[in-house]
Amino acid sequence: MLQGYDIAVVGAGILGLAHALAAARRGLKVLVLDKDAQANGASIRNFGFVTVTGQQAGDCWRRAMRSRDVWAEVAPQAGIDILHSGFAMLARRPESVAVLEAFRRTEMGAECELLDAAEAARRFPDLCAGTPRALLWSPHERRVESRDAIPRLAAWLAAAHGVEFRRDTLVRGVTEKGVETADGLIPARMVVVCPNDDFLTLFPERIAAQGVTKCKLHMLRLANPGFRLPGAVMSDLGLVRYLGYSELPEAEALRPVLLAEQKAQLDNGIHLIVVQSADGSLVVGDSHHYGATPHPFAPEEVDRLILEEFQAALGIAPPPVLERWTGIYPSAPDKLMFRDAPAGNIRLVMVTSGTGASTSFAIAEETLAELHGEPA
């Protein structure tokens, strides 16, 4: 008789690993299956930036706060370094300052500080060569090195929680009895499918009904700039992209200004994020291009526009580029994530906003509560 599991999780990206953790913490026998030999998708191709400030008000912000706390709990146990904490938003325009002032008055901005130019330069001199008009400092954010953190998290789940992993395994079907692979049925009382950008293998009709497409982004690694960042850094292009800012009424005055001054960046979905690795190098990005099958090419012009924003925001010439890559994640125009129920014991879960590192742990806890019939 085939060995059975309490829950099978399809997909070993951050969302799948988060569901494995949430299940293991309930004492369940957990199996994780993935078609790749090792982590290779969006979960290791990002900034490792656990972003709280700027997430959409309501559920997304609360999920980010909870997920940040789970990262803080599991990182030391799994041997994952928190490379830096906190986040600085650099505002170069008066309209940007108005958005930050409005944000600071919200619940989400309660623990943040809004510094004027003089105070920002005193507190964070390495960030202020670009002479920002103001700087919003948030204490909430955390940063890990994704390409190391995801494998370490998986290894810890196996060693500390007994989670079983089967890689190089394609799940061809899911039923209420378990998961179908090339080796036959693996019984499981519950199944959670976290397919990232695979829209066709499992439940394609249900995924299509969500209006999901794919988003390609450009990422770069720059050489050590010769100083340490106090935390992650963003520029005011992010104020019209991150919903926690862009949904504020004050953002309406900023949009036409950015469109007039930086149309090329907006046309390529560019907003600046800069984080630092243990060796001092900087991970910098990113851009956003959408399509059912984004092309594999990475035009130099897009990277140039990202680096142009880096220089304008930080006021220094970009260090040499050491590495370039692209990532692809699911995206939907009207939702940040969805959780679908093909059957009572099956859940299809997808983050459709590039916020997987920031919200997955909380999403997974919600999924397990729902599968166990617990009130929301």
Image (tube, rainbow, N blue to C red):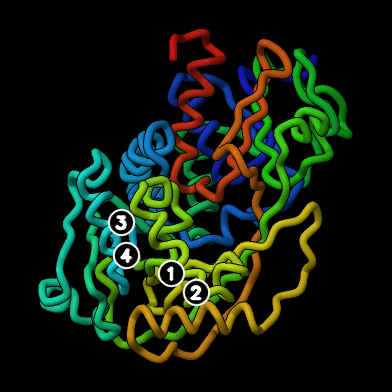
Q: Where is residue 140 in the image (x, y as percent from the top left)?
A: 27, 50
Amino acid carrying label 2: it is Ala
Q: Mark 2 points at which residue?
A: 260
Give me the C-alpha separation between circle 4 and circle 3.
7 Å
For the residue carrying disc 2, how many other residues have a C-alpha within 10 Å: few (<14), some (14-19), or many (20+)?
few
In this rendering, the label closer to the viewer, 1 or 3? 1
Q: Which mark is residue 99?
A: 3
Dot 2 lies on which element? Answer: helix
**Left or right, 282 with reference to 118:** right
**Contact? badges 2 and 1 (CB < 8 Å):** yes
Give me the C-alpha separation between circle 1 and circle 3.
13 Å
Dot 4 lies on which element? Answer: helix
Going from N to C along the chain, the mark reached first, 4 or 1, is: 4
Quadrant in which the N terminus appears = top right
Going from N to C along the chain, the mark reached first, 4 or 2, is: 4
Dot 1 lies on which element? Answer: helix
**Left or right, 172 with reference to 262:** right
Amino acid carrying label 4: it is Glu
**Contact? badges 4 and 3 (CB < 8 Å):** yes
In this rendering, the label closer to the viewer, 3 or 2? 2
Q: Name the residue under label 4.
A: 95
Quadrant in which the C terminus appears = top left
**Contact? badges 4 and 1 (CB < 8 Å):** yes
Q: Where is residue 29 in the image (x, y as percent from the top left)?
A: 57, 22
Residue at the image position 34 percent from the left and 65 percent from the top: 232
Residue at the image position 31 percent from the left and 74 percent from the top: 92
